[in-house]
Amino acid sequence: MANFDFKALSPDTIIDGLESAGFTVDSGLLALNSYENRVYQFHDDNKNKYVTKFYRPQRWQLAQIREEHDFSFELDEQELPIVAPLKRDGESLFEHKGYHFAVFPCRGGRIFEVDNLDQLEWMGRFVGRIHAISAQRPFQHRPSFNTEEMLYQAQDTIATSNFVPQVLHKPFFTILAQVIEVAAQQYTQQYKPAHQIRLHGDCHAGNILWRDEGPHFVDLDDCRTGPAIQDLWMMLSGDRQQQLLQIDTLLMGYEEFFSFESSQLVLIESLRTMRVVNYMAWLCKRWQDPAFPQNFPWFNTGKYWEQQILMLKEQMSALQQPPLSLLPV
């Protein structure tokens, strides 16, 4: 799996696959910025624009991909602004020469402005609506946010990858182990399984497109079960005072549709730790895919790992700070 690099996925293979699923391609394929999967924009003979996603083989089970699709259909049926895959003959997941792929309508839009309080409140309302629906039933096949996979297994991946320069081994792995210990303890002590709901899972500004009628969400590829705060914390930015105002604004909209447990605010830094540690491990796992050295040339350098030591020290400090709290009414 780690060595899979999409070498056999040629433009002809992509076009043949799309046509076998009932889509015509009357243009070239415009590669979009996706590295975990391969994503392309094209248009048909009526000039309708589409985006196709070819899934990285062996990353997800087919049942997990179908559950991702079903989640998007469920939200779309409730008139939530989710870009759901298109169906042909009742099927949204197609296969060609061993590759599984989906096709989506192409939606344009502006980047969500994380420092715009009006947009934040609007986003809060939409995430609240999503969670009100997603809380009604659990995922059966998708994974959860958990410390074993996202901290300990990620730590092992980094350790066995041999990317960390020997001279930096001790300082890097010492602070990494310390950060993981604190984050795992916070997450497992504060997080109760009864609070799990289905999540978008990767709700950052790059997965939110803004149009005149409001936001719409793309890319449910990382949807998982977890605490509601996971779909909110990545929209926070700036210093502590700015983040306090932002979370208060988000929740003002959110709680119009779904109740938020303020005790989850303590999970923000442990979830952030999972994200940054998992990101390092992801780059290690995928480095043999030629797309990664081409697009992340800074990764396999001593300077990168020196920066990660500093980042982890800052993250340790953040884990030890009091959590955000809601502004008094």
Image (spheres, rainbow, N blue to C red):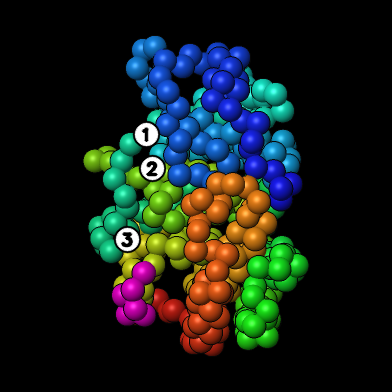
Residue 232 in percent (x, y) is at 45, 61
**Residue at horizontal 35 percent and vertical 45 percent from the top:** 209
- Sequence-first tag of 2 and 1: 1
Pointers 3 and 2 in contact (CB under 8 A)?
no
Q: Which residue is mark 3?
A: 114
Please tell me whether residue 198 is drawn above or below residue 18 in the rendered image: below
- What is the magenta range? 237-242
Is disc 2 placed on a helix, strand or loop?
A: strand
Residue at the disc numbered 1: 107
Numbered disc total: 3
- Verify whether residue 240 appears in magenta: yes
At label 2, counting other C-alpha atoms closer than 10 Å, the crowd grade (few under 14, some 14-19, many 20 or more) is: many
Query: Eyeballing the image, is 249 above or below 215?
Result: below
Whether 318 is among the magenta residues is no
Q: Which amino acid does the dot numbered 1 rest on?
A: Arg
Where's residue 51, x and y in %?
46, 30
Specify the label residue 174 is tagged with.
none
Mark 2 highlights which residue? 216
Question: Is residue 67 visible to us here?
Answer: no
Q: Earlier in the sequence, mark 3 or mark 1?
A: 1
Q: Nearer the viewer, residue 15 or 190?
A: 15
What kind of element bears circle 1?
A: loop
Q: CA distance from mark 3 to mark 1?
A: 20 Å
- Please identify the quarter of the rendering in which residue 44 is found: top left
Name the residue type under label 3: Val
Q: Are marks 2 and 1 in contact (CB under 8 Å)?
A: yes
Label 3's element?
A: loop
